[in-house]
């Protein structure tokens, strides 16, 4: 009587019970769940007609559109494997990922057709190129294919350990790695998400997070499982975000801390009348307590911090609120809410361990590496057994994140292990220093990196983006940190920049900043 765990089963239930309910909003296009799944079925039939079979890979390069969302159903229900590609990569990266994954069909949004055409001759294994929007010579028309197809296709038997997606890491310092996510991985993440972060039937979710990023943190399936409404957003622009929240009655959204900072710092004329009560899930980097405090105090939003990686499907912890948190002053409560938190009920086991593999004491001070095992951990890296063995060869997935465990059991990331600054034998958490500087009224964004020092080994260097119309000096910001933290933690230098270099998922590219910091010291 057992049936395989798969997010496709959640979609079956929603289609049966909520077919007439609004499923997708994409500009002027509005689809009910029955209309949405009819389109998915037609695209499945069209793909099957193009020769796509179980186990084949289909790549997509697109922002958050209805067509991109349809791919998360139409491809897997064929037993094929979806490869959602980061659309902000270079054409050479597109070619590498398509070739490495073995994709035979590539579906591309109109904004990236020219980029793919530029490297098309480098992808000999691709049999069909599909234009999601617009038309172009040598490309299949997605909408025409759906219109011409019947909503009938041959459904294969799908096992819960079959591959669902291959998600490529950002590849900022090396070639991207393909993370293999199974149907079971995604189903367990969806269940855990809805247990800890419930969505009511009909609630509306705004796509401020790229769908390609760890499958939109699995919200591509989670919103559907709850019979919510997907409100597509193709580009994150604060004015558009605030408008859609008002006009579409948005209840919740996911966003990296950098996106939250842009919303928190948006001028009043951009924000308009801010709708209170929006639930925000943030991850991707440790959020600053000051940002959480502002969104909750000024906007009346509710921010929940979760933690995970592409390799963990992605959620493994949630900063679950406790009754005693409610009694804390807002600033102290924001500090607690900025922690990574505790295991989800469905994610598996998390340990913070030292270099010998022993759990660190729950003292809020001793650094260790976050390691995990359980239902959401990837199958491995696609066609890369050596990287798989390095990451999880001892039966635990090693995250590379340096963290402490507080006496209440809540984990808190202090840095990436490779980014911990060791100055004069002391460990400095860049996250702690960044959180302190973000409390300065003139600071909009900040990143701390370690730079070489003949005397100390390394010292902290701050890169700061100021709020519009505000000013601050290097000595002022250094003194601000020294007044609040141990003096050795304060940056020795500050570089003011217009913006910080970021990946498509909102993570700061520290290696770029380190190069700039070292140049500024010469």
Image: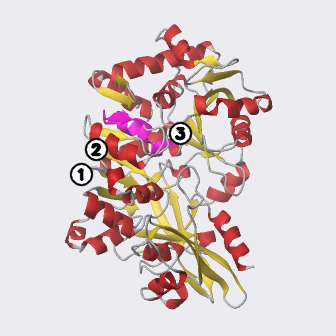
Q: Which residue carries the number 1 mark?
A: 277
Marking on residue 187: none
Q: Outermost residue, front direction?
A: 469
Question: Could you give the CA–CA distance between mark 3 and mark 2, rounded to whole angstroms?
Answer: 29 Å
Q: Which residue carries the number 2 mark?
A: 251
**Where the C terminus falls, by quadrant?**
bottom right
Choose the circle earlier in sequence order: 3 or 2: 3
Is the residue under label 1 in contact with that under label 2 (CB below 8 Å)?
A: yes
Question: Could you give the CA–CA distance between mark 3 and mark 1, rounded to whole angstroms?
Answer: 34 Å
- The residue range painted magenta reads 215-232
Question: Which of pointers 3 and 2 indicates the residue nearer the eye?
Answer: 2
Rate crowding at label 2 as few (under 14), some (14 to 19) or many (20 or more) other CA atoms within 10 Å.
many
Rate crowding at label 1 as few (under 14), some (14 to 19) or many (20 or more) other CA atoms within 10 Å.
some
In the depicted view, which residue is nearer to us: 513 or 346? 513
In the depicted view, which residue is nearer to us: 22 or 513? 513
Quadrant for residue 510, please give it: bottom right
Quadrant for residue 260, please give it: bottom left
Choose the circle earlier in sequence order: 3 or 1: 3
Q: Left or right: where does residue 57 sit relative to residue 36? A: right
Q: Left or right: where does residue 276 sit relative to residue 418? A: left
Rate crowding at label 3 as few (under 14), some (14 to 19) or many (20 or more) other CA atoms within 10 Å.
many
Q: At which x and y percent is residue 501? A: 60, 59
Q: At which x and y percent is residue 185? A: 49, 43
| Secondary structure beneath label 3 | strand
Q: Left or right: where does residue 299 sit relative to residue 171? A: left
Residue at 61% x, 71% y: name it: 419
Q: Which residue carries the number 3 mark?
A: 182
């Amino acid at each position: 009587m057992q049936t395989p765990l798969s997010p496709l089963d959640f979609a079956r239930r929603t289609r049966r019970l909520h077919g007439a309910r609004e499923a997708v909003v994409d500009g002027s296009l509005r689809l009910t769940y029955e209309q949405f799944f009819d389109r998915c079925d037609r695209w499945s039939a069209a793909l099957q007609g193009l020769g796509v079979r179980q186990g084949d890979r289909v790549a997509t390069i697109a922002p958050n559109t209805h067509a991109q969302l349809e791919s998360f159903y139409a491809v897997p229900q064929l037993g094929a494997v979806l490869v959602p590609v980061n659309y902000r990569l270079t054409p050479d990266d597109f070619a590498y990922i398509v070739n490495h994954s073995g994709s035979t069909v590539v579906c591309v949004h109109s904004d990236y057709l020219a980029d793919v055409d530029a490297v098309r001759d480098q992808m000999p294994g691709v049999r069909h190129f599909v234009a999601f929007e617009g038309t172009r010579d040598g490309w299949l028309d997605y909408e025409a294919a759906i219109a011409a197809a019947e909503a009938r296709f041959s459904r294969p038997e799908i096992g819960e350990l079959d591959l669902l997606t291959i998600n490529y890491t950002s590849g900022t310092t090396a070639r991207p790695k393909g993370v293999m996510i199974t149907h079971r991985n995604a189903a367990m993440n969806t269940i855990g998400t809805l247990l800890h972060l419930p969505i009511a039937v009909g609630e509306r979710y705004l796509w401020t997070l790229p769908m390609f990023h760890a499958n939109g943190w699995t919200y591509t399936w989670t919103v559907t499982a709850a019979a919510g409404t997907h409100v597509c957003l193709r580009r994150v622009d604060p004015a558009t975000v605030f408008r859609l929240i008002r006009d579409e009655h948005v209840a919740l959204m996911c966003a990296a801390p950098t996106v939250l900072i842009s919303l928190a710092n948006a001028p009043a004329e951009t924000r308009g009348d801010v709708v209170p009560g929006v639930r925000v899930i943030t991850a991707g980097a440790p959020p600053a307590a000051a940002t959480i405090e502002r969104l909750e105090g000024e906007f009346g939003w509710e921010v929940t911090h979760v933690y995970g990686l592409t390799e963990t499907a992605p959620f493994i912890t949630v900063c679950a609120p406790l009754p005693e948190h409610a009694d804390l002053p807002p600033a102290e409560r924001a500090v607690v809410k900025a922690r990574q938190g505790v295991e989800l009920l469905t994610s598996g086991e998390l340990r913070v361990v030292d270099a010998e593999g022993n759990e660190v004491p729950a003292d809020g001070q001793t650094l260790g590496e976050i390691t995990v095992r359980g239902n959401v951990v990837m199958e491995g890296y696609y066609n890369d057994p050596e990287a798989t063995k390095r990451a999880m060869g001892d039966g635990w997935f090693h995250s590379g994140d340096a963290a402490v465990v507080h006496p209440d059991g809540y984990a808190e990331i202090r840095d990436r292990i490779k980014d911990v600054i060791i100055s004069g034998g002391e460990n400095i958490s860049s996250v702690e220093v960044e959180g302190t500087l973000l409390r300065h009224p003139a600071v909009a964004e900040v990143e701390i990196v370690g730079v070489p020092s003949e005397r100390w080994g390394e010292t902290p260097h701050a890169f700061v983006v100021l709020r519009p119309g505000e000013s601050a000096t290097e000595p002022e910001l250094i003194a601000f940190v020294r007044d609040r933290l141990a003096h050795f933690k304060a940056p020795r230098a500050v570089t003011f920049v217009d913006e910080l270099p970021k990946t498509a998922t909102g993570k700061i590219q520290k290696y770029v900043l380190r190069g700039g910091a070292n140049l500024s010291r010469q």
